[in-house]
Image (tube, rainbow, N blue to C red):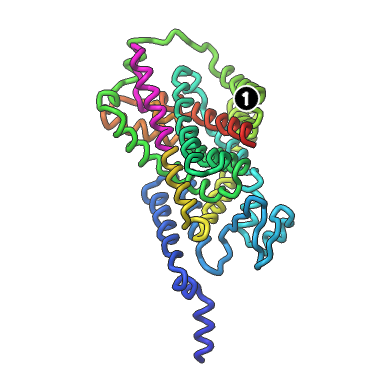
């Protein structure tokens, strides 16, 4: 009878958890992320699958955690080192489990990031940016965090490729971070993906914190509509619909000529937007890109990225350094946009609310919504959403181009 109870006990996960209490830390992290996604509604479409993936990955015996291959693609399979890229997919599924199958088939190959960018393009309206093109420069300024953290990371001992993968977190764009890391430092994909998506979900916390440090109340009260009335723009587009159709074609062509390595991201982003803007003739393509394909891709991405967050992969100094560096990159990107607005305001009669600079990172449209809520706290009539979207959308393009530049120089 004692042997039966012993076998029953060993069958459960309790013995493993007691032997390795660090599992409890991972459960706590998963529950916190679930709370933020469900109760606080911080990007629930992303945070809930990521958090649940973390939970699934850390149940001993469940075989749902992603096992990272090293720089040479070698991975331990039942005590034997094998090259993951030489293993058939059915062997990965059988030997390593469901999450590893999804991860190595869809994420590690670089398949899902461009697919998600296609969905993002289908859900994005470039109209606000095209109507306020001068504000798009702040999307470029917000890339400061990427290159600043890249330099700091190199000084701290990371290789240039690892530093670039770390710095790209400052673009606040999960697919871009994953795509860049796959190309430059695939062995860091797990912690970088977790950091990138976690900070994206925490935009409602991070942007107000940085804004409070850098902006005065008077600056946050700058009313963009009043500034437009005082200093009306001379530029007027007579046929916005035609411009919206031409824009994605033109951007793709220009990016392809100057930064070819950014085409997988920018090209798919612009294709998704193009099928949206054409209208009824491509509605079925738009509907698939923005709904079924996008939703399926988000589920697989979230669960498998969360499943990379095992005790072995997460609870180490390198990962902690990546998490800290990622936060620094994120905060510097927000700061770069704000400081660029402040500099602009020194030389221009037509003032700009620094909240528009704060949204120069990606995280569209959440960053714009957060900035708009901050503006309304200081002035209930000061709606800055459409102006923030201009900087926010340009930040998406800017981070993808920055990723392409880094890949070109460091590959």
Where is 230 relative to 276, above or below? above
Q: Residue at x 59, y 47 (%)?
A: 296
Q: Which residue is mark 1?
A: 255
Number of callouts in the render? Answer: 1
Residue 173 or 82: which is nearer the viewer?
A: 82
Label 1 neighbour load within 10 Å: few <14, some 14-19, many 20+: some
- Please tell me whether mark 1 sits on a helix, a strand or a loop: helix
Q: Position of residue 354 (x, y in %)?
A: 35, 25
Q: Position of residue 71 (x, y in %)?
A: 63, 50
Please say whether residue 344 is one of the residues in the magenta stretch.
yes
Please identify the residue farthest to the top as the structure is shown: 234
Is residue 251 visible in this depiction of the protein? yes
Where is 319 relative to 340, above or below? below
Please identify the residue farthest to the bottom as the structure is shown: 1
Q: Residue at x 36, y 10 (%)?
A: 231
Q: Residue at x 41, y 27 (%)?
A: 337
Q: Position of residue 224 (x, y in %)?
A: 35, 19
Per the picture, the main secondary structure of the magenta-coloured stretch is helix
Where is 92 relative to 174, above or below? below
Q: Position of residue 63 (x, y in %)?
A: 58, 65
Q: Quadrant of residue 406?
A: top right
Residue 278 or 215: which is nearer the viewer?
A: 215
Q: Residue at x 40, y 40 (%)?
A: 203
Task: Give, as a single range, the part of the protein colored magenta.
Answer: 330-355
Quadrant (top left/top right/bottom left/bottom right) for the C terminus = top right
Q: Quadrant of residue 141?
A: top left
Residue 403 or 6: which is nearer the viewer?
A: 403
Is residue 269 visible in this depiction of the protein? no
Please say whether residue 202 is one of the residues in the magenta stretch.
no
């Amino acid at each position: 009878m004692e042997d039966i109870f012993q076998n029953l006990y060993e069958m459960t996960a309790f013995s493993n958890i007691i032997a390795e209490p660090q599992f409890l830390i991972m459960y706590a992290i998963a529950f916190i992320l679930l709370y933020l996604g469900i109760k606080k509604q911080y990007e629930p479409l992303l945070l809930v699958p990521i958090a649940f993936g973390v939970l699934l990955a850390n149940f001993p015996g469940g075989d749902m955690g992603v096992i990272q291959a090293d720089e040479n693609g070698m991975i331990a399979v039942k005590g034997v080192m094998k090259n993951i890229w030489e293993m058939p997919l059915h062997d990965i599924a059988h030997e390593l489990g469901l999450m590893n199958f999804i991860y190595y088939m869809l994420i590690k190959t670089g398949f899902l990031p461009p697919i998600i960018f296609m969905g993002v393009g289908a859900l994005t309206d470039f109209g606000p940016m095209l109507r306020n093109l001068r504000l798009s420069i702040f999307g470029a300024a917000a890339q400061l965090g990427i290159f600043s953290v890249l330099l700091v990371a190199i000084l701290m001992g990371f290789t240039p490729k690892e530093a670039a993968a770390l710095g790209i977190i400052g673009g606040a764009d999960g697919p871009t971070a994953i795509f860049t890391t796959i190309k430059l430092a695939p062995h860091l994909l797990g912690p970088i993906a977790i950091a990138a998506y976690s900070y994206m979900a925490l935009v409602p916390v991070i942007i107000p914190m940085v804004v409070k440090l850098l902006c005065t109340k008077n600056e946050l009260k700058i009313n963009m509509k009043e500034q437009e009335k005082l200093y009306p723009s001379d530029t007027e587009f007579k046929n916005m619909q035609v411009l919206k159709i031409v824009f994605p074609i033109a951007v793709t062509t220009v990016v392809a000529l100057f930064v070819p390595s950014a085409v997988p991201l920018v090209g798919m982003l612009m294709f998704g937007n193009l099928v949206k803007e054409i209208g009824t003739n491509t509605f079925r393509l738009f509907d698939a890109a923005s709904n079924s394909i996008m939703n399926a891709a988000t589920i697989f991405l979230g669960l498998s990225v969360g499943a990379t967050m095992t005790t072995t992969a997460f609870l180490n100094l390198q990962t902690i350094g990546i998490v800290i560096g990622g936060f620094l990159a994120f905060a510097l990107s927000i700061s770069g946009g704000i400081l660029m607005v402040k500099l602009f305001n020194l030389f221009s009669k037509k003032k700009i609310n620094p909240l528009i600079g704060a949204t120069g990172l990606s995280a569209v449209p959440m960053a714009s919504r957060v900035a708009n809520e901050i503006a309304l706290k200081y002035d209930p009539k000061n709606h800055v959403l459409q102006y923030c979207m201009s900087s926010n959308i340009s930040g998406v393009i800017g981070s993808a181009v920055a990723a392409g530049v880094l890949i070109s120089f460091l590959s």
